[in-house]
Amino acid sequence: MPEAAVSHESRAPGRPRSLEADRSILSAALDLFIEDGYQGMSIEHVAAQAGVGKATIYRRWPSKEALITDAVCSFSEELTAPDTGAVRDDMLGLVRQIVELASSSPSGRCFARMAGEMISNPELAKVYKEKVIGHRRAIVRQIIVRGMDRGELRDDLDVGLVVDMLVGPLLYRALIKRAAPSETAGMASAFIDTLLVGIAAQS
Amino acid sequence: MPEAAVSHESRAPGRPRSLEADRSILSAALDLFIEDGYQGMSIEHVAAQAGVGKATIYRRWPSKEALITDAVCSFSEELTAPDTGAVRDDMLGLVRQIVELASSSPSGRCFARMAGEMISNPELAKVYKEKVIGHRRAIVRQIIVRGMDRGELRDDLDVGLVVDMLVGPLLYRALIKRAAPSETAGMASAFIDTLLVGIAAQS
DNA sequence: TTGAAACGGAACGTACCCGTATCGGATCTA
DNA sequence: TAGATCCGATACGGGTACGTTCCGTTTCAA
């Protein structure tokens, strides 16, 4: 994160840093990281695409690695847990969100790029898993746990395993397919119903 | 692929190309591609690790891109479809193979690296999907179809969807976890049984 | 034995990139 | 207004990489 340019008590003298520059740099860095990878992107391209000078970037981040680390974690809270009262509807809503994210938003493409970059950059991998993946898994988890609490799902489930079974196929499709989101969305019902048979409580 | 140095009828004059060099170049290229990515790897490093001169590489492949394309497709037939006569045992054997591949062999790490590189290199993505992913999906498909033919599985299944549900969670775990294969292997039974409930024929 | 082509090694030209430094101008506080 | 800091633009030094070219040497067929 760019260091706060001022303390809350008394502002530093001189021209304050442009918040607009903060945003455009992070956005450009994320785009280029996704498109070209860690080694493939360059600070010069980031500066050009963000419409700022290179010094403006190095005034905020000490190195390329620090910038990318921040950019990768800059996703706003894009995923929200539906709470309809029925686990099937919750899952359906969640799956639709994931399908949408995986194709249209940068976050899906970022996951694909990170899958590779995590091999050679453990520090980046650690932060990404904690900040982005951990946060998303917690949301998916919520839906499963609520279903168990309501008695809709078996109470002996391994929640982590169910999360994997719910999220894994969607991300796998997003990684290897050039499929339109509508195509994957059409399979959502069949997918969830098949999975539900295995995890629902005995009726 | 390195062009055949000779026709079958009459060999070209001069020293023939070293098959050993072919192998060591492809192996080094694959290793470094997985570890450092497309832009991160260098032909110089490939040559050094393979123990050959740079000219020896450029005598066989016209460019870095052509070399990587060949290297990525150089996996031998690592996955084989078990045929035990029971779909559950077939799936169990397959899952164990996938878990093993995803962690120990280069092919699992290559999939992770390719997930990112496919974003910016459509040509490489096309070849990889056809040659590697297509081949593996066909093997998984075989097991599903055999189970349907034997009446063990419902006959109205979307085979592609079942393949995604079987493979997706395993690859997802391999991508984001630093988990030992044994850990994932321990979940194989629970995973398959949960999935089977949803796809098995009514008893 | 001779010629042809491959071999490993090294150098080259061109291009790019990281991180730093410097410039004149713009924008803030006091 | 005065001083401080930020701004975009530009240049620099050191390093790396692609793809080519040239070496002297090695390995093959005729």
Image: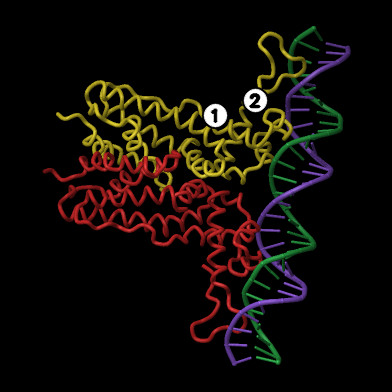
Chain colours: A red, B yellow, C purple, D green
Which residue lies at the image location 62% right of the left edge and 82% below the top edge? A14
User: Which quadrant is home to the C terminus of chain B?
Assistant: top left
Q: Is residue A21 left or right of residue B43?
A: left
Q: Amino acid at mark 2?
A: Pro
Give residue B9's quadrant in the image: top right
Q: Position of residue A163 (x, y in %)?
A: 31, 48
Which residue lies at the image location 61% right of the left edge and 27% below the top edge? B23
Q: Secondary structure at mark 2?
A: loop
A29 in relation to A167, above or below: below
Q: Amino acid at mark 1?
A: Ser
Q: Which residue is mark 1?
A: B74
Give residue A183's quadrant in the image: top left
Q: Position of residue D13 (x, y in %)?
A: 79, 61
* First-in-chain label (2 vs 1): 2
Q: Residues within 10 Å of mark 2 (few under 14, many from 20)?
A: some
Q: Secondary structure at mark 1?
A: loop
User: Which quadrant is home to the N terminus of chain B?
Assistant: top right
Nearest the viewer among C24 and A199 is C24
Name the subunit of mark 2: B
Name the subunit of mark 1: B
B157 in relation to A17, above or below: above
Mark-to-mark CA distance, 2 and 1: 12 Å
